[in-house]
Amino acid sequence: MLNAGVKRQIAVVGLGYAGLPLALAFSQHNRVVGYDTDESRIEELKRAFDRNRALSRSAISASSLKVTAAIDDVSECDFYIIVVPTPVTATKKPDLDHLIDATTAVGRRLKKGDIVVYESTVYPGATEDLCIPILERESNLKSPTDFAVGYSPERVSCGDTDLSLHNTVKVISAQTAEALEIIHTVYSTTIEAGLWRAPNIRVAEAAKLLENTQRDVNIALMNECATIFDALGICTKDVLQAAETKHNFARFKPGLVGGHCISVDPYYLLQKAQEAGCEATLIPMSRTINDAMPSFVVGRTIALMREHNPDIVNAKIGVLGLTFKENISDLRESRSSDIVFELKRHGLQPLVHDPLAQPDEASNLYGIGLQEWKSLRELSAVIVTVAHDAFRQLEAAHFREILVPGGLVVDVKALFDATMFAGTGLRFWQL
Ligand SMILES: NC(=O)c1ccc[n+]([C@@H]2O[C@H](COP(=O)([O-])OP(=O)(O)OC[C@H]3O[C@@H](n4cnc5c(N)ncnc54)[C@H](O)[C@@H]3O)[C@@H](O)[C@H]2O)c1
């Protein structure tokens, strides 16, 4: 019924950070149409330009991927991969609007024998309880007899050049064993590291949430310990280096937790916990701890500035980094932006520099105007929030160039060694 053995024509729905690399990878082995509702994104991709700077012009132009903003162009496809955003609302509830829209559009074009695989991060049950009924309603077909559905969580860590689609094991799941084998055949052309068959769709959905919730909780523990060690006058970096010599010590570091995955996915799990009547405590507490870090960093910065000069009104503070993590341009859920707003709330003048962030995006998302390095002068303090390679390479002389004598360097990501500032006349604090 599902036409096993037939070479599949793939439609990738949603060509963002996760969808575009996926579409390009599959296009090396299959006919692939990439569909996105954002017409400007499609126009850029037709000119082989990826605004996310994740893929090069040559990689895009060398591929056979056809990109389109016209949904009818996917009608001949028989294998749909849906990888649209699943953010949270202002009240931290799952926002499934994009998922519902994409599912409706695909449902209207479904034919007998088609397969739909979801890659968007969702809570357990979203694929079966929310998406499949929409697909059935819009197509007038029944699953799993007429068409079948699978779920395969996106795992690639953007900006991490060592980990790619090719060398990361991928979890796959489906409604039936037959559909799972077809999905396995299609994905195994591209995923060289191997595929893990989850016993059902809910397990695969839950696995993705667990992966990111585990990171959130562990980083929260590091953040809490870092605040305790700071109060005790102990260097957290030194403690971590010592503790990491233990064979089973889990390596996590304190810092800001932003982005559309780690700071968002736990809320998807919490939604289901709430519906199931489970009172989760560790997960929401971890979210609270991590979300409080911008305020903690600003509080320490202000206290240390006042030690040197009690009059800090209107002082200029540099903020190095606005993206949510190192070496990428992605500004979604940036916790550095929280630092900027917190500084302003205290009557300080933040000047933000990020060589990778797009100025128009920073302005649209946060109303923050990015500064050139040469505009950073006479700063009372500088807070390094993101571990971009460009910041790692900074030397004491660079900080002397931008700070007033006695100025403060706040190193949130523990990129530098305190000894680097000895004899410079600058002061140094590290999370
Ligand atoms: N970016 C990552 O590294 C990553 C990692 C793991 C999981 N994920 C998950 O993958 C999913 C997509 O994330 P992303 O980072 O690629 O998002 P993104 O915002 O970068 O891209 C999503 C794309 O989908 C398009 N889109 C929105 N609604 C659409 C619709 N109805 N039809 C077609 N296209 C539509 C948008 O225009 C956008 O180009 C999310 O669920 C996310 O949690 C992403």
Image (tube, helix red, strand yellow):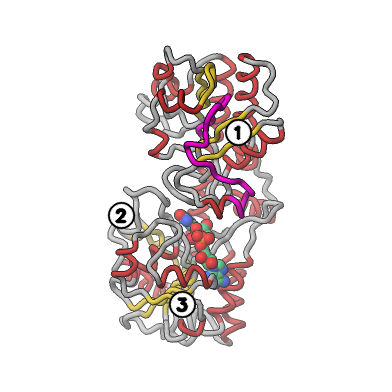
Front-most of 357 and 200?
357
Front-most of 269 and 327?
327
Amino acid type of the residue tagged 2 in the rendering: Asn
Q: Quadrant of the N terminus?
A: bottom left
The magenta-colored residue range is 363-384
Write down the residue under mark 1. 293
Task: Locate residue 251, reporting x and y percent.
Answer: 42, 33
In this view of the protein, can residue 142 be seen by the observer? yes
Write down the residue under mark 3. 68
Task: Locate residue 423, reporting x and y percent.
Answer: 42, 12
Within-10-Å neighbours for mark 2: few <14, some 14–19, many 20+: some
Task: Locate residue 134, reporting x and y percent.
Answer: 61, 77
Q: Quadrant of residue 241?
A: top left
Q: Circles 1 and 2: CB distance less than 8 Å?
A: no
Q: CA distance from mark 2 to mark 3?
A: 28 Å
Write down the residue under mark 2. 167
| Residue 172 located within the stretch drawn in magenta | no
User: Regarding mark 3 in the picture, which secondary structure is present there?
Assistant: strand
Q: Is residue 254 above or below residue 271?
A: above
Of labels 3 and 1, the one closer to you: 3
Q: CA distance from mark 1 to mark 2?
A: 33 Å
Q: Residue at x 64, y 23 (%)?
A: 302
Q: Which of the labelled discs sits on residue 381, or is there none?
A: none
Q: Earlier in the sequence, mark 1 or mark 2?
A: 2
Q: Residue at x 61, y 69 (%)?
A: 129
Q: Is residue 4 above or below residue 52?
A: below
Q: CA distance from mark 3 to mark 1?
A: 41 Å
| Residue 371 located within the stretch drawn in magenta | yes
Front-most of 116 and 61?
61
Q: Quadrant of residue 191?
A: bottom left
